[in-house]
Amino acid sequence: MKKSSFIPKPQKSQTEAPIKITDGEKKKEESSSDEEGELKDIIPDLKSIPNIYDIPKISTSEKTSLSKRYSPLDWKTAFPETYKINDNIPIYINGNKGPNLVCLHGAGHSGLSFAPLALINKNYRIISFDFRGHGYNTMSEGDDLSEENLINDTILVLNYINEKFPLDNIIVISHSMGVLLLLKLVKKFLKIKINIKIYMIKFKD
């Protein structure tokens, strides 16, 4: 048997009736055109946006001044004197007269984070050091950042400073992790009845 194929008959052409636009549809078209006009006012013409290649280039002298302004501080100028306790704990010193302002840095930082303070120093001997596991500290137990070890390291540094500058008072300032360690250290000293004065400084925004 032959397969039957279905071919649709062509439909008769019909004359299209003219489309009538109602008053409601006219209002919709007018409102849409108003919205397009508002968008044009909000969205800038692409031709008015400056090309990145049209932006004036920075001169060499301006680049030099910017690099000086935002370049990292040279810690060697901030701390002219450097020592090491037991060839492991680096000590950074700025200034040649007391009292001794001993700085305890925060977690993930180093004693060099106090370089801006050292650069404007005029009346103190600024002293900072690197906790184990930070900065240039090369202690073999650098991974053991227990509270007890960090406090004992701080006591070791304070004893070193007291022996090196016996005639000058010691003032301790601290940041972040250093604050917690200082409070624990004070609590430890209070148990053996040593007179310590604590000043809490709050900086305004």
Image (spheres, grey):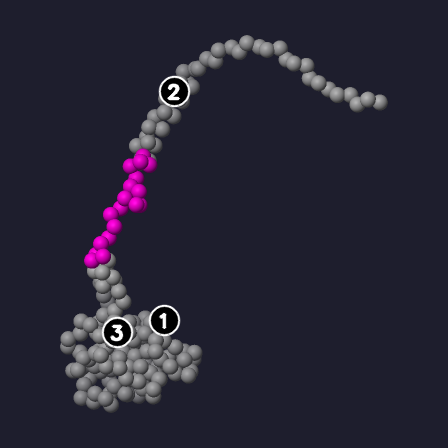
Q: Is residue 6 above or below residue 105?
A: above
Secondary structure category for the residue under label 1: loop
The residue closer to the viewer here, 55 or 8, is 55
The residue closer to the viewer here, 174 or 118, is 118
Instruction: Tell me where the magenta segment starts and ends, as one range.
Output: 45-62
Residue 15 sits in quarter: top right
Say what amino acid the circle numbered 1 marks: Gly
Select label 3 or label 2 by which is in front: 3
Q: Which mark is residue 27?
A: 2
Q: Which mark is residue 75?
A: 3
67 within the magenta span: no
In the picture as drawn, the residue positioned furthest to the right comes out as 1
Q: Is residue 116 above or below residue 195?
A: above
Query: Would residue 64 be found to the left or right of residue 108 on screen?
Result: left
Q: Quadrant of the C terminus?
A: bottom left
Q: Which residue is mark 1?
A: 108
Query: Would residue 11 be found to the left or right of residue 174 on screen?
Result: right
Of the numbered discs 2 and 1, the one sitting upstream in the chain is 2
- At x 23%, y 77%, the residue is 79
The residue closer to the viewer here, 100 or 129, is 129
Of the numbered discs 1 and 3, the one sitting upstream in the chain is 3
Q: Which mark is residue 74?
A: none
Q: List x then y, in percent, for residue 144.
A: 43, 80
Q: CA distance from mark 2 to mark 1?
A: 66 Å
Q: Quadrant of the N terminus?
A: top right
Secondary structure category for the residue under label 3: helix
The residue closer to the viewer here, 70 or 53, is 53
- At x 28%, y 84%, the residue is 83
- At x 40%, y 22%, the residue is 28
Residue 65 in sight in this render: yes
52 within the magenta span: yes
Q: List x then y, in percent, for residue 95.
A: 18, 79
